[in-house]
Amino acid sequence: MSKIAMIFSGQGSQAVGMGQDFYNNSDVAKEMFAKAGERIGVDFKELIFEENEKLGQTAYTQPAILLVQMVAYKLFKDACPDIKAELFLGHSLGEFSALCASGAINYIDAVELVHNRGKFMQSACDEIEAGMMVLVGLDDASVEKVCADAQANGKKVWPANYNQDGQLVVAGMKSDLVSLEQTFKDAGAKRALLLDMSVASHCELLTPAQEPLAELMANMVKDEFEAPIISNVTTKAYSTKDEAIALLKDQLIKPVKYKQSILAIAGDVDIAIEFGNGIVLKGLNRRIAKELKTLNVSDMASLAKVVEEVCN
């Protein structure tokens, strides 16, 4: 029996129309959309299937992504009830989907939780010009040195997402990021591109969001984990409510160590299955650990392929 990691991408993987194939072909998907929408007062069909500005707003992006991922995961589990995860792993927001898939939080509660997480993050950045920048072609140590030197000079910039070798996202004050663009290029970056983000994820600017998130989690998360979750912060496994609250609270202000997490688990699992829109993590995994086979469930056709491969 293959050892399987169930994995979930984060913000940036959203797209208009994601999950629509599931919705059109599954009563389970329709019910999940309806119940999640009732909880937070959002018409998810309108939010996800029609062109609108809200899907790009973090308070709506997060529940939309999580919902589609949970629909994909539910349909897979219904088709393959005997398949158990060796572990769960998510990238940023995706760690909340991992928490949900593990059974530690109900998907409807999780939709409400990340809806509010988005609000808390936006509120923390409302009075400041925050942003994020992706760096291509620069090694981790060089990025960390530029950030450390900048901090010593009063600038607010931090490494935020370790995605793969040569691709790292930094976060902080937008003006400080812009001022360092040439510095990063002088250090060897092939590209330094400011992202279309109004929040600065995974850095100290989100400190005001930590306590409100932890309070909500305390009322929603249970001590019921089907399998351990790999923490973005530590790259280590956890499987208790208290650890989940502490680590996901910490995740708001600490970098996502996705590359390091995949390297840590690559020898422990045979297959990773990415649930939800697109193949963001499948692409990263191919470049991080070629030996880790990654499949994806993003529509009914890919679901059928994965079911055929791992469940029969």
Image (cartoon, helix red, strand yellow):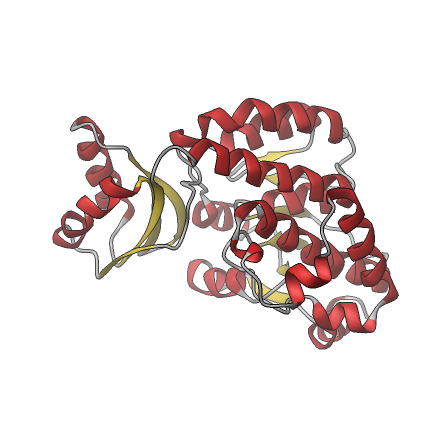
Q: What percent of the width, then of the height, locates residue 278?
A: 57, 67
Q: Reply above or below: 58 against 24.
A: above
Q: What percent of the width, then of the height, locates residue 179?
A: 18, 44
Residue at x 34%, y 50% (from the top left corner): 168
Residue at x 35%, y 34% (from the top left corner): 128
Q: Reply above or below: 271 against 253.
A: below
Which quadrant would residue 3 be assigned to in this image? bottom right
Q: What percent of the width, then of the height, locates residue 63?
A: 65, 49
Q: Reply above or below: 44 against 177.
A: below
- Which quarter shows the N terminus? bottom right
Residue at x 20%, y 27% (from the top left corner): 154
Q: Nearer the viewer, residue 8 or 64?
A: 64
Q: What percent of the width, then of the height, locates residue 85?
A: 72, 50
In the displayed orientation, state which residue is furthest to the left: 186
- Which quarter shows the C terminus? bottom right
Residue 102, visible in the rendered structure: no
Q: Is residue 216 left or right of residue 14?
A: right
Residue at x 62%, y 55% (from the top left corner): 65
Residue 109, visible in the rendered structure: yes
Q: Nearer the viewer, residue 11 or 260?
A: 11
Q: Is residue 284 left or right of residue 236?
A: left
Q: Is residue 213 left or right of residue 186?
A: right
